[in-house]
Amino acid sequence: MKRRFPFTTLYLLLLAAVVIASWLVGLYGVESGGNLLSDEGGRWWMRSVLPSFAASPVEEILVVLFTLGIVKSVWLESPRVKSKKATAVALMVFVALMGLLLWGVFSGALMSVTGHWANSPLQRGWLVVLALLIGIPSLCYGLTNGTFTNREQVLGALCSEVVRCAPSFVTLFIASQLVAVLAYSGLPAVCGIGAAAFHGIAAVIYWLPFVFEYFYKNRI
């Protein structure tokens, strides 16, 4: 069996490098951020370990994995013959959900207070909305055609992809500390990285181990 890419080790090494770099930057008097080896840096870190993990996209990742588990169980692994009745039920549920979504958009309920997309609930929660649009009709299809006959089967399908990617949640905890330390140290600004670019880099740091782990385990 091929060895997995050591994201956890890589992120730990990067975390240590950022801590040392923040000390060096502070040593040479660059007013860009916080020295993580200072007393203030230590106090900040102790206060922010759990909030930093909570600020990571752990909820979004779980929702995506729940959806993938349902979709995979219903559409890829189910041995049952496709049912016209189940397809009709899934389609009706999808149309109903789309109707609710469109109503929320055009009524302004899902938009910002100014009626725009920017900073709206829909912009912030689009991934969850997409997962629900896919996952709920798939679940209804599975319940209707007999793929799921009891609660345990549904729970097993929901958890299947979470279990598959479980090691990456350890990596996610380290990644959350790495992103938080980078932001506190101010090193991205020293390197000329703007807020938008840093946000994109943070997203890659968070999601890459899960994408790699998911497709690696589906390949072997």
Image (spheres, helix red, strand yellow):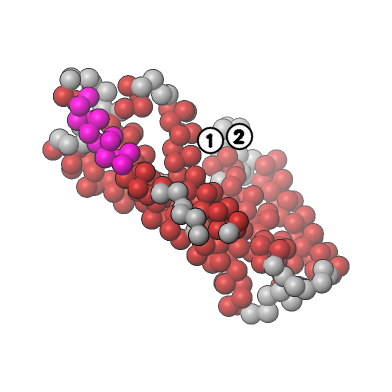
Q: Is the C terminus in the top left, top right, bottom left or bottom right quadrant?
A: bottom right
The quarter of the picture where residue 124 lies is: top right
Query: What residue lies at 17% left-to-right and 20% top-to-bottom?
Result: 28
Does residue 35 appear in this view?
yes
Q: Is residue 82 above or below residue 42?
A: below
Q: Around disc 2, counting alpha carbons within 10 Å, would you say few (fewer than 14), some (14 to 19), or many (20 or more)?
A: some
Q: Which residue is mark 2?
A: 117
Would you name the residue on which mark 1 appears? Answer: 119
Query: Is the stretch drawn in magenta largely helix, strand or loop?
Result: helix
How far apart in space, not on screen, are marks 2 and 1 (Cα)?
Answer: 6 Å
Given the image, on which type of amino acid does mark 1 rest? Asn
The structure residue drawn at horizontal position 31% and vertical position 42%, both measured from the top left corner, is: 13
Residue at image position (23%, 43%) is: 45
- Which mark is on residue 14? none
Give the image location of residue 16, x and y in percent.
Answer: 26, 40
Does residue 15 show up magenta in the picture? yes
Label 1: few (<14), some or many (≥20) within 10 Å? few
Q: Amino acid at mark 2?
A: Trp
Residue at horizontal 24%, vertical 36%? Answer: 19
